[in-house]
Amino acid sequence: MEMSSKLLERAVAEISQLPGIGKRTALRLALHLLKQPKEQTEHLTEAILKMRDDIQFCRECHNISDVEVCEICSNHSRDKSIVCVVEDIRDVMAIENTGLFKGIYHVLGGKISPIDGIGPSQLNIPTLVEKVKNGTAKELIFALSSTMEGDTTNFYIYKQIKDCDVVLSAIARGISIGDELEFADEVTLGRSIIHRVPFENSLKNH
Amino acid sequence: MEMSSKLLERAVAEISQLPGIGKRTALRLALHLLKQPKEQTEHLTEAILKMRDDIQFCRECHNISDVEVCEICSNHSRDKSIVCVVEDIRDVMAIENTGLFKGIYHVLGGKISPIDGIGPSQLNIPTLVEKVKNGTAKELIFALSSTMEGDTTNFYIYKQIKDCDVVLSAIARGISIGDELEFADEVTLGRSIIHRVPFENSLKNH
């Protein structure tokens, strides 16, 4: 896309490097900023730069945090022996929104994915294994998405701790509450029949 | 959306002020930047800030430009008596891509839209009227989108120059080349019959 201004062209090129944003959307965003007061652009760029420069990760669970130990890890009413293994902060926010989990989290920062060039060394796996080996964590709940990458990551961690004294579980997969059976995919439906639960249990937390 | 970091929360709030970007997309973009090297964020924010600070508008046509008079206006082979009236730089780029227009442009910078709080005073209309009154422009081609706002803007300009010695035209509306008649909307199809062109003319520029 050739433009009458190199400044605009460069800004569009940089914006369109963000995931899910093409050249056209980038141009729309740039023109929007040009129409707004200069302060909006300054606030936007300052907030992004400050976030990138000053962000910290919790020493315990590796979640994004403004302090050395995050609110969840420093909360004494949470059970530190139950650790939920998740990919990133979005999963933490989703589970926290349910209000049903009283343990703590361990944020891996991604999933093993050779295609994207992400190996185990880039993830926060050693500290998790350490928590299991020194006995702090008594139960791990795997809550990664059930994709090839998620399963690989779960299995990689499992191999390193399978001889330890730790309970391993994975979040239940099945038909969403409110969903119609006829529209469910076969794999999910099949698993939800094999992993059926006693009827009395299914009445809980409704 | 409550987050474990105020820095992240502020960045997400600023990003989600951009048009078409909600909180979830903003969070995805922020997490993406956190995973990339710090340089990418620096390049991105610097390019945006520099664009906002240093961008210029062509003195003649008000298009975005890095110099005082843009390439199109300073090109001696272009016919300065034919002026195409457009909304913004995207329209200029679209028409330039056809390679069929040899006149110059006049970028209004928007359309009259009371709902969005845009009145005639915010648009580059006086300089256009001046071009007509002093005889520089001998033909105006209205190329705004055919919405209520576009029509209002065209009519507002028309009222101010209707007594001047100037040819006024509007781009042709009709069925797109390659489109099926059965899927065309009635208004476009109706107009394309009323404004039919001699068959010999329809063979041109194929």
Image (spheres, coloured by chain):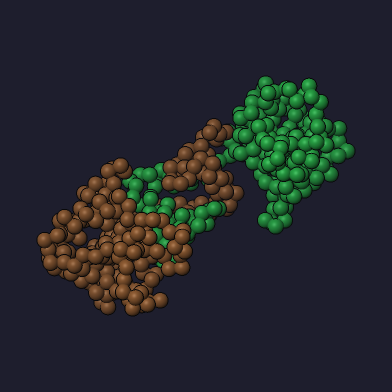
Chain colours: A brown, B green
* Residue A87 appears left or right of B132: left
Q: Position of residue B63 (x, y in %)?
A: 63, 37
Q: Height in image: A63 above or below A30?
A: below
Can residue A68 be seen here? The reply is no
Residue at x 43% of width, y 46% of height = A19
Residue at x 57% of width, y 49% of height = A32
Residue at x 77% of width, y 34% of height = B140
Q: Position of residue B59 (x, y in %)?
A: 66, 36
* Residue A144 appears left or right of A4: left
Looking at the rendering, which quadrant does residue A200 occupy?
bottom left
Looking at the rendering, which quadrant does residue A161 occupy?
bottom left
In this view, the residue in front, B3 or B125, is B3
Q: Height in image: B169 above or below A93?
A: above
* Residue B200 appears left or right of A55: right
Q: Height in image: B56 above or below B17?
A: above
Q: Residue furthest right?
A: B163
Q: Position of residue A66 (x, y in %)?
A: 33, 64
